[in-house]
């Protein structure tokens, strides 16, 4: 398992997030990986995904595909 450098992370959240900005997840583009965290707990755990896998996930979500 490789380590991802979080020092350069610039976090952003969806424009659909509530006015307080703490009702969503935040993402950071780290070039080779995408980091995801809970906006209510910004010092908590961070999940990282390979950028290509995350891009595929976003395409599927936008297309309305779900795997229940």
Image (tube, rainbow, N blue to C red):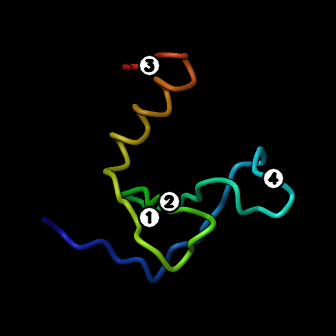
Identify the mark nearer the N-term, 2 or 3: 2
Q: CA distance from mark 3 to mark 4?
A: 24 Å
In percent of width and height, residue 57 lies at 42, 33
Query: Which mark, by number, is residue 30?
Result: 1
Query: Which mark, by number, is residue 66?
Result: 3
Q: Quadrant of residue 7?
A: bottom left
Identify the mark nearer the N-term, 1 or 3: 1
Q: Quadrant of residue 30?
A: bottom left
In percent of width and height, residue 51 lies at 37, 48
In the visual, does 47 lie left or right of 40?
A: left
Q: Which residue is more in the foreground, 66 or 2? A: 66
Q: Quadrant of residue 38?
A: bottom right
Quadrant where the C terminus lies? top left
Q: CA distance from mark 2 to mark 3?
A: 24 Å
Q: CA distance from mark 2 to mark 4?
A: 22 Å
Q: Residue at x 44, y 61 (%)?
A: 35
Q: CA distance from mark 2 to mark 1?
A: 4 Å
Mark 2 vs mark 4: give the one in front: 4
Q: CA distance from mark 4 to mark 1?
A: 25 Å
In the visual, does 13 lie left or right of 63?
A: right
Whether pointer 2 and pointer 1 mark residues with C-beta atoms closer than 8 Å, the reply is: yes
Q: CA distance from mark 1 to mark 3?
A: 26 Å
Identify the mark nearer the N-term, 3 or 4: 4
In percent of width and height, residue 32 lies at 35, 58
Q: Residue at x 49, y 33 (%)?
A: 58
Q: Which residue is mark 4?
A: 18
């Amino acid at each position: 398992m490789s380590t991802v450098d979080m020092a350069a992370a610039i976090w952003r959240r969806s424009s659909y997030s509530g006015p307080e900005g703490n009702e969503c997840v935040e993402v950071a583009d780290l070039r080779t990986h995408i980091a995801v965290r809970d906006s209510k707990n910004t010092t908590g755990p961070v999940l990282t995904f390979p950028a290509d896998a995350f891009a595929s996930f976003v395409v599927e979500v936008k297309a309305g595909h779900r795997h229940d």
